[in-house]
Image (spheres, rainbow, N blue to C red):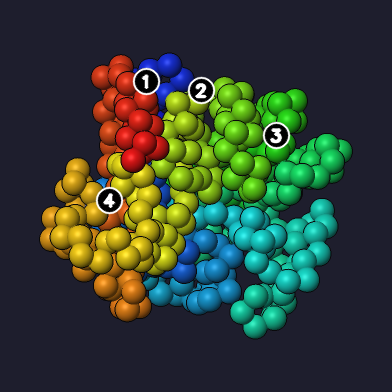
Amino acid sequence: MTRFAFDIHATDGKARTGTIRMERGEIRTPAFMPVGTAATVKAMKVEDVRAAGADIILGNTYHLMLRPGAERVARLGGLHKFMGWDRPILTDSGGYQVMSLSDLRKITEEGVTFASHLDGSRHMLSPERSMEIQRLLGSDIVMCFDECPRADQPRDAIEKSMEMSMRWARRSRDAFDAGGDHAARSALFGIQQGALDEGLRKASADALADIGFDGYAIGGLAVGEGQEAMFATLDFAPGQLPADRPRYLMGVGKPDDLVGAVERGVDMFDCVLPTRSGRNGQAFTWNGPLNLRNARHAEDTGPLDERCPCPVCTKYSRAYLNHLHKSGEMLGAMLLTEHNLWFYQQLMAGMRAAIADGKFTDFASGFRRDYFNH
Ligand SMILES: [Zn+2]
């Protein structure tokens, strides 16, 4: 049984396509992971997430530790059994969401103490506790506990934060390795920090490679710096990481972000955008985003996207989706989320096929022509 293997089948420029093999299934890369924050990909049944083409989903340590609690999930047989998803799950470390969601944070070398955004109760996260929670959940791909500083801080603050994250990466590695059977069946990813600074990114990449991980995430991007600055950083950051391991850009992104990041050598992504947008009336299509609340769709009998083979586009009209969203009907959120997840997975499949055929440049320029000129 394979614990974790990554084979790159083809490259085209910096873009790569391959397969990650794990006990619970294969992950085709470039891969998009739908976000299942609270043990659910919002508004979707897991069988429909799979039907859309997802090989792996993401769970959030911060949310699950607070509700229903990691120990409870473990007593109930683990996150896979709890939510009915039997394929790989990646869990984040909780670090990023503690910084963005909780109140009264106190960060020390030991870890972070904070108050729950739900009820104000006091909690602690450290590299050791984060590894324990991810083990209790039964995660397949475990993320190191790190600090994600705001990108607009001075360089010395970014450097100090990155260096602490690298010490936390070492502690995460040691705590993960002590996890017995879970460590023997799952993988651990390190997270590169260093904001937009090439030298700090390199120092972080070297520190992580020295510890050794199954895959490497690029953290600290998509935190408000804008696409131009993100792409400028991705011009060098992926190439600093070990070439034979998957590279995961955390929290990204819009369809055009994904194409630009794959072009720069990224293999894995997660983002709430397709699911959150689906609940807000926004659909992604090959001809750009659409707001289904707009009155221009009220008598449009056509599908959301002529090119989309999803169960929504083959059955329902824009007029019906407009009505559901104007009326606040929950089916509107469900149908738009389903289409958006299909669209994201079709985009990834299109990129994988184009890389395999050596035609990624054509694919990317065709995508941008259709997506931005509508
Ligand atoms: Zn569709």
**Residue found at x 50% / y 45%:** 252
Residue type pointed to by label 1: Thr
Does the rendering let one see residue 349? yes
In this orientation, which residue lies closer to the viewer: 10 or 338? 338
In this orientation, which residue lies closer to the viewer: 149 or 146? 149
Residue at the spot of label 1: 361
Instruction: Find numbered disc 1 in the image and state the secondary structure of the residue it sits on.
Output: helix
CA gap, disc 2 and disc 4: 29 Å
Residue at the spot of label 3: 196
Q: Residue 92 carries which label?
A: none
CA gap, disc 1 and disc 3: 26 Å
Residue type pointed to by label 2: Ala
- Label 1 vs 4, first from the N-terminus: 4
Residue 83 horizontal/vertical position (percent): 35, 68
Q: Quadrant of the C terminus?
A: top left
Residue type pointed to by label 3: Leu
Residue 318 horizontal/vertical position (percent): 23, 61
Residue type pointed to by label 4: Trp
CA gap, disc 4 and disc 3: 32 Å
Q: Which mark is residue 243?
A: 2
Q: How crowded is mark 1: few (under 14 residues within 10 Å), some or many (20 or more)?
A: some
Toward the left, the furthest residue is 315
CA gap, disc 1 and disc 2: 21 Å
**Residue found at x 27% / y 61%:** 297
Instruction: Find numbered disc 3 in the image and state the secondary structure of the residue it sits on.
Output: loop
Q: Does the residue labelled 3 lie within 8 Å of ligand 1?
A: no
Instruction: Find numbered disc 2 in the image and state the secondary structure of the residue it sits on.
Output: loop
In the picture, residue 18 is in which quadrant? top left
